Amino acid sequence: MANITRHTPFGVTDPFEMTDPLDNLFRGFFRPVQVDKDMPQIRMDVKEDEKSYAVHADIPGVNKDDIHVSIDGNTVSISAEVKKNAEQKEGEKVLRRERYFGRVSRSFALENEIDEAAASARYQDGVLELVLPKKMAAAAKRLAVQ
């Protein structure tokens, strides 16, 4: 008498484990992205009045020369180059070293377009302050039909 074996194309040896073939098909393809908790994040507050937007972004421990702000219509992008190198030594033996280099960025869209020429940015005490004036909508021009 011959033994009958079940072919398992998804690599599952226990037939009761295979509840949904699609779950097992994509197993291992989608892995969660780990975020380094020591790497700074850009946290923001955005306020609006009739004439402009005010943005306060927390970017601690970054040089102001390493912060870049770009405006494209109503989209604002903030990026910063993070360079951290802290080291504690006792004699020749390194007791602790924390070092990371990287880039953090954040983009967001506003309701109105921004007047790039009148926009201003200031960085003080780890807080980036942006004043983004709204671009005045051009008044509708009425054409005379001849």
Image (cartoon, rainbow, N blue to C red):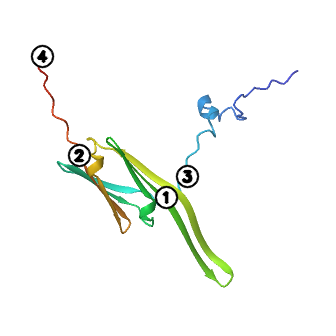
Describe residue 50's horizontal placement relative to residue 80 as left or right: left
In terms of sequence position, does the residue under pointer 1 or pointer 3 come before the other? 3
Q: Are marks 2 and 4 in contact (CB under 8 Å)?
A: no
Q: Nearer the viewer, mark 4 or mark 3?
A: 4
Secondary structure found at label 1: strand
Whether residue 52 can be seen here: yes
Residue 134 circle label: 2
Residue farthest right in this picture: 1
What distance separates the C-alpha of mark 3 from that of mark 2? 37 Å
Circle 1 residue: 81
Q: What residue is disc 3 on? A: 34
Q: Which mark is residue 145?
A: 4
Secondary structure category for the residue under label 3 = loop
Q: Residues within 10 Å of mark 3 (few under 14, many from 20)?
A: few
Going by the numbered disc 3, the residue's amino acid type is Gln
Disc on the earlier residue, 3 or 2: 3
From this view, report whether residue 90 is shown above or below residue 76. Answer: below
Residue 41 occupies which quadrant of the picture?
Answer: bottom left
Q: Nearer the viewer, mark 2 or mark 4?
A: 4
Q: In the displayed structure, would residue 39 be above or below residue 114?
A: below
Pick whichever of labels 2 and 4 is earlier in the sequence. 2
Q: Earlier in the sequence, mark 4 or mark 3?
A: 3
